[in-house]
């Protein structure tokens, strides 16, 4: 058994609705236990956010946003942010998904610290439902 195989027990507290949603996902994905699902979720979380610690290397990636595009203030805020980061945003694709909701995909490339700043600005906007980022390092 290697050090990676050593297991530690943890206890977590969750609201009932969050636990129900998690259990539904476990059933759909056919996990054998909550522990297996939590390990997988933590692994995914770690992979998605490792790049936040990397402040210098160049990266490429995809940002996906879901938001209520009928909000005039949000539209202007998004426009301002896009204008501020035109050097990072290589492609922007938008599609209406419901009457008031829009999915936007940004293909980005640039220094990690600037990509992080862009993602933080997007995530703090009111009426943004979701911001997801996937990036990969260009070196190595």
Image (cartoon, rainbow, N blue to C red):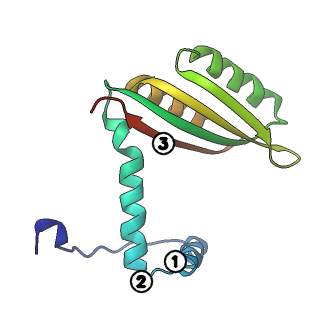
Q: Choose top left, top right, bottom left or bottom right for residue 5.
A: bottom left
Residue underneath mark 1? 26
Q: Choose top left, top right, bottom left or bottom right for residue 95.
A: top right
Question: Considering only order in the chain, which callout, 3 or 1, is on the residue closer to the N terminus?
Answer: 1
Q: Residue 98 location, x and y as percent?
A: 84, 49
Q: Residue at x 40, y 70 (%)?
A: 38
Left or right of residue 83, residue 41 in this image: left
Residue underneath mark 2? 33
Q: Residue at x 57, y 23 (%)?
A: 89
The answer, for residue 48, to whether it is visible in the render is yes
Q: Residue 120 location, x and y as percent?
A: 51, 33
Q: Look at the numbered disc 2 and give the secondary structure of its residue.
A: loop
Q: Is residue 49 above or below residue 83?
A: below
Q: Look at the numbered disc 3 and give the secondary structure of its residue.
A: strand
* Label 2, label 3: how far apart the Cα atoms are: 27 Å
Quadrant where the C terminus lies?
A: top left
Q: Look at the numbered disc 1 and give the secondary structure of its residue.
A: helix
Residue 90 shows which numbered tag? none
Residue underneath mark 3? 134
Q: Residue at x 48, y 42 (%)?
A: 134
Question: Considering only order in the chain, which callout, 1 or 2, is on the residue closer to the N terminus?
Answer: 1
* Label 2, label 1: how far apart the Cα atoms are: 8 Å
Q: Residue at x 26, y 76 (%)?
A: 9
* Label 1, label 3: how far apart the Cα atoms are: 23 Å
Q: Is residue 66 above or below residue 118?
A: below
Q: Residue 64 location, x and y as percent?
A: 61, 41
Q: Choose top left, top right, bottom left or bottom right for residue 132.
A: top right
């Amino acid at each position: 058994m290697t050090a990676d195989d050593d297991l530690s027990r943890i206890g977590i507290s969750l609201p009932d609705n969050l636990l129900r949603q998690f259990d539904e996902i476990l059933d759909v994905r056919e996990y054998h236990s909550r522990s297996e699902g939590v390990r997988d979720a933590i692994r995914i979380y770690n992979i998605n956010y490792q790049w936040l610690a990397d402040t210098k290397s160049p990266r490429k990636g995809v940002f996906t946003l879901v938001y209520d595009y009928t909000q005039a203030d949000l539209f202007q805020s998004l426009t301002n942010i896009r204008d501020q980061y035109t050097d990072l945003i290589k492609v922007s694709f938008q599609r209406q998904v419901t009457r008031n909701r829009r999915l936007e995909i940004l293909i980005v490339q640039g220094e990690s610290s600037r990509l992080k700043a862009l993602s933080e600005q997007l995530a703090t906007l009111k009426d943004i439902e979701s911001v997801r980022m996937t990036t990969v390092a260009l070196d190595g």
